[in-house]
Image (cartoon, grey):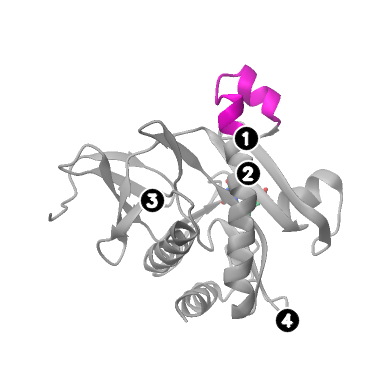
């Protein structure tokens, strides 16, 4: 079946979703637009959409091969993939292996400190509120997810962390932290969104060189090169 983009149903900071002739499937398009600090900082990272589409495709396939249900169906074009139409749960999950970003700020810790065990966090997905950190009691009490669903999110995210570490370490990449989003589809929970240098921190083993969106957030330069380097390693 040929999939053509129909009505645009959502346009976010980095991606657009279009309907298809099949009500269960959407086209997810990756843009070059970059934002940080709740979209107060904006820019363009040349070809980021192409890189993130391809990296996400490889990582979703890798996870599927290991039994993790994801929304990914297949690549369509340079910047587009066919995905299942999830009802997104408004929770951003993060998993951390090394202190960086928000965790350094929240707890006054130095970036780069390896954690004694992975840290699983949930955040309320709300730009105006700056995605506040919350716990499972908040999520249940606010009606965002059922306790069994939250247990699934945690178990699955920690498994994703192990699989991604196994994938990246032979490629000389240290997986510092990442963000995941999940949704409901036909009564089950699927991993959605993207897994890319926009949503993960990747540090080169040995040098500590940042190969992710922190180059944009912190004006470190060499942004396009960093994204291309990640694509090369992911596809190698
Ligand atoms: N992250 C993301 N979207 C967000 C917030 C964070 O993709 O809205 C990713 C970020 O790239 C990093 C991880 O989640 O890999 C942890 O981010 P953190 O909580 O440290 O927040 P930040 O420092 O980016 O504000």
Task: Point out the stretch of residues depicted in magenta.
Answer: 135-150
The answer to whether residue 149 is left or right of residue 172 is left
Residue under numbered circle 2:
155
Observer-nearest of 74 and 99 = 74
**Relative image position of residue 113 (x, y in whole percent):** 83, 62
Does residue 10 lie above or below 179 as drawn?
above
Q: Earlier in the sequence, mark 2 or mark 4?
A: 2
Residue under numbered circle 3:
15
Identified at 48% across, 54% down, the residue is 67
C-alpha span from label 1 to label 3 = 28 Å
C-alpha span from label 3 to label 4 = 31 Å
Q: Is residue 99 visible?
A: yes
Q: Quadrant of the N terminus?
A: bottom left
Sort mark 1 into few (<14), some (14-19) or many (20+) by Cα contacts within 10 Å: few
Which numbered mark, 1 or 3, is in the foreground of this view? Answer: 1
**Relative image position of residue 173 (x, y in whole percent):** 63, 74
Q: Which numbered marker is on residue 151? A: 1
């Amino acid at each position: 079946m040929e999939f053509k983009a129909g009505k645009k149903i959502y346009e976010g900071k980095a991606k657009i979703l279009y309907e298809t002739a099949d009500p269960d499937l959407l086209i997810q398009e990756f843009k070059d637009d970059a934002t940080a600090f709740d979209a107060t900082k904006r820019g363009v990272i040349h070809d980021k959409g192409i890189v993130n589409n391809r990296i996400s495709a490889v990582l979703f396939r890798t996870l599927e091969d290991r039994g993790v249900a994801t929304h990914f169906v297949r690549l369509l074009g340079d910047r587009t993939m066919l995905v299942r139409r999830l009802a997104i749960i408004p929770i951003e999950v993060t998993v951390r292996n090394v202190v960086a970003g928000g965790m350094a700020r929240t707890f006054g810790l130095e970036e780069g400190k390896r954690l004694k065990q992975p840290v699983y966090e949930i955040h309320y997905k709300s730009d105006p509120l700056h995605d506040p950190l919350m716990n499972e009691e908040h999520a249940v009490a606010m009606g965002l997810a059922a306790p069994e669903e939250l247990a699934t999110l945690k178990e699955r995210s920690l498994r994703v962390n192990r699989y991604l570490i196994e994938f990246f370490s032979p490629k000389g990449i240290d997986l510092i932290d990442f963000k995941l989003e999940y949704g409901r589809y036909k009564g089950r929970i699927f991993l959605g969104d993207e897994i890319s240098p926009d949503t993960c921190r990747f540090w080169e083993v040995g040098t500590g060189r940042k190969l992710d969106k922190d180059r944009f957030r912190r004006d470190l330069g060499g942004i396009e090169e960093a994204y291309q380097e990640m694509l090369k390693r992911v596809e190698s």
